[in-house]
Image: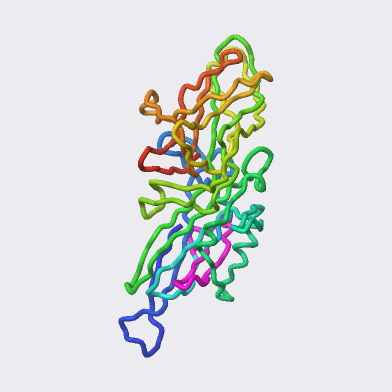
Amino acid sequence: MTAVTGCSRDASDEPASLRETATLKLYIDLTDSRDRSRAVGDEFEDYKWAANDGEKMHTVRVIVLDAQQRVEHNSLWTLTAADIRATGREFPVKANETKTIILIANEAGKTVTAPDGSRVSAADLFGSMLASDGAEVDVDRLRGYTHELEANTDGDDMTAPLLMSAIHSYTIGNEESYSATFTIHRAAVKYTFRITAPDDEPHTVNAVHIGRAASRQYLFPDADFTADNQMEWSAYRTPADAGADVLSFTRTTAIAAGNSEQVELAPVYLPEGMNLAAGDIYNVGLTVDGIFTGMKDLNWSIPQTPDVTIPMTDLPRGTHVIVDITLNHTDFEIDYTVCLWTVYNIDIPSFN
């Protein structure tokens, strides 16, 4: 999302040096790729397009608050319009103050939970923040809202299209013009299982099992950002009761005998995972030919150095966990997993 601000002074008795209003023009930048995809490949899989429409941004709501946290602008954009990128939209806002910019994508059909435990439709919550009434928004309370797996499932995992969210601050001062770009984050993590079965027996993968998966997350990232574009952060936090033991997901897939090529299962989308204590490690398992294989710990690496692995103890939103598995009868080996972040500086790429 790009905001371009051109300022103008209202006719008044104020000094000429003080600008009272600004004209804010917003554009949505959708990746110009196959089938109007709103997702691009990450740096290690740049040939990949969006795995499905559920990973794309279909609608986005833009809410702008003034310095008193009152709504100056609230509109829902439908991104199927062919001219949405070219035209942009304009509206006046106050100048010489810091704005809060709230972004919510794919709000339809999503349920969120208030700090007091009450649940509400995301569309109703954000649609009620009316600029015409100058509605006041408690941003601190809004940051306490959570997004529950239980209330937002579609079959096994998170309802698609995936909810996306962000809160930005930006100061419009007294200069002639400003230009800024604001990113939005998928409120989910993605697991992809890629399986090779080279032995002489056919197999059927019945289900995948993900250990220590989170059942809920904050609606907006609770993170310490290290970059203005909010694409890198050094730490993040999840609700204290976000944990779950093992979640199981049906993935019935037949694999022919002697199949040395990878078979990729349909992805699983979950809330971002909590930080685990030292010694606790994320793990996964399979049910193959009706037999549960047991859980295996995950160690993460990057493709450039697959032999350099670190126990996987955190899983911030936007990350893509790729689990490579080799089946040998009823046992399996994890070759490596790819989780794109580093120990001290978490880099969040868009997953495919």
Query: Extreme bottom residue here?
Result: 13
**Total count of labels:** 0
Can you say whether 329 is above or below 64 in the image?
above
Q: Residue at x 49, y 55 (%)?
A: 166
Residue for point 56% across, 65% down: 75
Q: Is residue 336 left or right of residue 157?
A: left
Left or right: 154 in relation to 238: right
Residue 73 in the image: above or below residue 142: below
Q: Which residues are magenta?
A: 63-88
Q: Is residue 184 above or below residue 346?
A: below
Horizontal and vertical percent for residue 101?
47, 63
Residue 83 magenta-highlighted: yes
- Residue 306 falls in image quadrant: top left
Task: Pinpoint residue 29: horizontal percent, then vertical percent.
Answer: 46, 54
Compare residues 260 and 316 and report the one nearer the observer.
Answer: 316
Q: Nearer the viewer, residue 242 or 103?
A: 242
Verify whether residue 222 appears in magenta. Answer: no
In this picture, is 290 found above or below 28?
A: above
Where is residue 13 drawn, in percent x and y?
37, 90
Horizontal and vertical percent position of residue 131: 56, 72
The color scheme shown is rainbow
Q: Quadrant of residue 74?
A: bottom right
Looking at the image, which is closer to me, 175 or 69?
A: 69
Identify the residue at horizontal 54%, vertical 62% (top origin): 141
Does residue 36 appear in this view? no
Residue 94 visible, this angle: yes
